[in-house]
Image (spheres, helix red, strand yellow):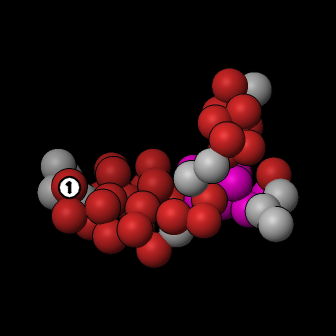
Amino acid sequence: MTNQKEYFNFLRQVLQATAESKGNPEVVYQLLQANLDKLDDKFAQFLRR
């Protein structure tokens, strides 16, 4: 089960990868693919807060 700290760290990683990849979507896609378990309804609720 993923907790809020893990969601926060995941979001930070996605934002950092987005910034550092300079528009290369493959970098972000790989990160998302590796963390599919975190892309759930609880993550959506976390983002809304």
For the view shown, which residue lies furthest in the bottom direction? 34
Left-right relation of 15 to 37: left
Q: Position of residue 3 (x, y in %)?
A: 83, 58
Identify residue for label 1: 25
Taking the magenta stretch, the answer to whether it contains residue 8 is yes
Relative to 44, is 49 above or below?
above
Q: Which residues are magenta?
A: 5-11
Q: Is residue 12 visible?
A: no
Q: Which residue is located at x 69 percent, y 52 percent?
A: 8
The amino acid beneath tag 1 is: Pro
* Figure quadrant of the N terminus: bottom right
Relative to 24, is 27 above or below?
below
Report the magenta stretch's main SS: helix
Of 49 and 15, nearer the camera is 49
Q: Is residue 48 visible?
A: yes
Q: Which residue is located at x 73 percent, y 37 percent?
A: 46
Residue 16, quarter of the rendered image: bottom left
Of 7 and 13, nearer the camera is 7
Of 46 and 23, nearer the camera is 46
Q: Which residue is located at x 32 percent, y 59 percent?
A: 28
Q: Which residue is located at x 33 percent, y 51 percent?
A: 18
